Amino acid sequence: MNRASGKPVIYLDHAATSWPKPNSVLEAMRHSMLEEAANPGRGGHRMAIAAGRVLMRTRMELARLFGISNPSDIAFMPNTTAALNQAIKGLLRPGDHVIATMIEHNSVRRPLEYMRQEHGVQIDYVQVDETGKIDLLQLKSLCRANTRLIVCNHSSNLLGNVLPLTDIAEIARSRGAFFLVDAAQSAGVMDIDVGASGIDMLAFPGHKGLLGPQGTGGLYIHPSIDLVPLIHGGTGSQSEEANQPSVRPDRYESGTPNTVGIAGLGAGVRYVRSEGPAAIGRREWELTQSLMEQLSSVEGLRLLGPQLGEPRTGIVSFTLKGMDSAEIAFRLDRDYGIAVRAGYHCTPLAHHSANTSISGAVRSSFGCTTTRADIEALIIAMRDIAASV
Amino acid sequence: MGARVMAFDSSQQALRAEMLLEERDIAFDMIPTPGAITAGCALSLSFSTEELGRVMAVVQEEHIEIRGIFRASDSSGEGSFEQLV
């Protein structure tokens, strides 16, 4: 149990952002702000160099976490959305074809739809079943000669199901398409190895499973891919040149970076690596199973996503017959001090697939600080609320 | 320290090289990039002639992007530079 605004809070909204962060993250940010938060790459004085080292150390931690051989292939971004925009808009050209899935977040869907409307890009969305399972045969059949990109999330932010990245990567490779993965819900809670999984680009948040602060994230770009930078400007390098530098990571990192945030992210990644993403994910999965077992007996409550026993990230979404999801979330917060998210979760297509387009859903989501007591509190609250319908 | 100067187009590439050379116990100094070397980054690493082979191995194995490795054409180190790599 944690406290915010003087009232006890049971925080079950880790899929939106993780909270609280490890003390080491706060300490790293405090140290950075107090001692070395000059502008990295701008000037050769010792504080600027120290700030630059913070960025490089965090990059190296991320490279080790994701099996990336060259840390310079990781560009820091303010969030996953920015990373996905850079990947999608930087790669696609008029006439290109893209395949995404029906469970993409708006951070993928909206850039794609923009590229369709403004730049003549063609898009197909692969169907999924009610639990989020992707139709791989349909994915294969949708591939065309001009398919340049296949993009999907690793785990749905509504359903929590896990997509078969290796299978999708193989389809992309065999058809000559690049493979972009949105790891918003999996980075830090599942093992990800870009080489072993055949991932060409990986967009990830710093502030969710990697336990860094908001305003951090990144994009891995395979060395064979040259994206048009979305942001042009000062990089502290090749200043005499009018054109954006080609050297990485500068090419994709114009403007002053979030040095203090990236210091915190580095500490978060070190924490995750010391615990092990798979071990963290396993604990969260066990919590989902306990919650699902108990909630399945609540009258009128419908659980979304994979069945008991199947893989999922630390997300359990549900609906309750006769009550709007926003009302449930409001009562959980007001009467029980439980923070969850309700509504459409920026993923309207996934709601369509799950048949929850009208009701929306309540999403509870777990992190490495979530306890069994937190889960018990949610179970008791939902029994109460269901009894009141 | 040295008779060789490695220059970069990116400070992040320079700082990565710094960390990798430290890890491998290769002696070097971080210096301001000499004005005679046109490079995109204000930081360079200098090292002795004897370390050139080991430094080159790190650069190649770790895919560090460098502007080049130079040697001073005169003994003062402040005049013109000849690009070796």
Image (cartoon, coloured by chain):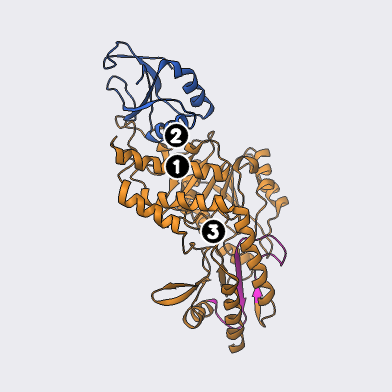
Is the C-beta separation of discs 1 and 2 under 8 Å?
yes
Q: Please name the color used to draw chain B.
A: blue
How far apart in space, not on screen, are marks 3 and 2 (Cα)? 38 Å
Instruction: Indicate which disc, 1 or 3, sits on the residue closer to the N terminus.
Output: 1
Q: Please name the color used to draw chain A.
A: orange
Q: Where does label 3 land, which residue?
A: A105
Q: Neighbour class for label 3 at 10 Å: few (<14), some, many (≥20)?
A: many
SS label for mark 2: helix
Label 2 chain ID = B
Judge depth for marks 3 and 2 and give the one in front: 2
In this view of the protein, can residue A160 be seen by the observer? no
How far apart in space, not on screen, are marks 1 and 2 (Cα)? 9 Å
Q: Amino acid at mark 2?
A: Met
Of all residues shown, which one is farthest toward the top?
B74
Q: Amino acid at mark 1?
A: Arg
Q: Quadrant of the C terminus of chain A?
A: bottom right
Count of numbered tags:
3
Magenta-span inclusion, residue A316: yes
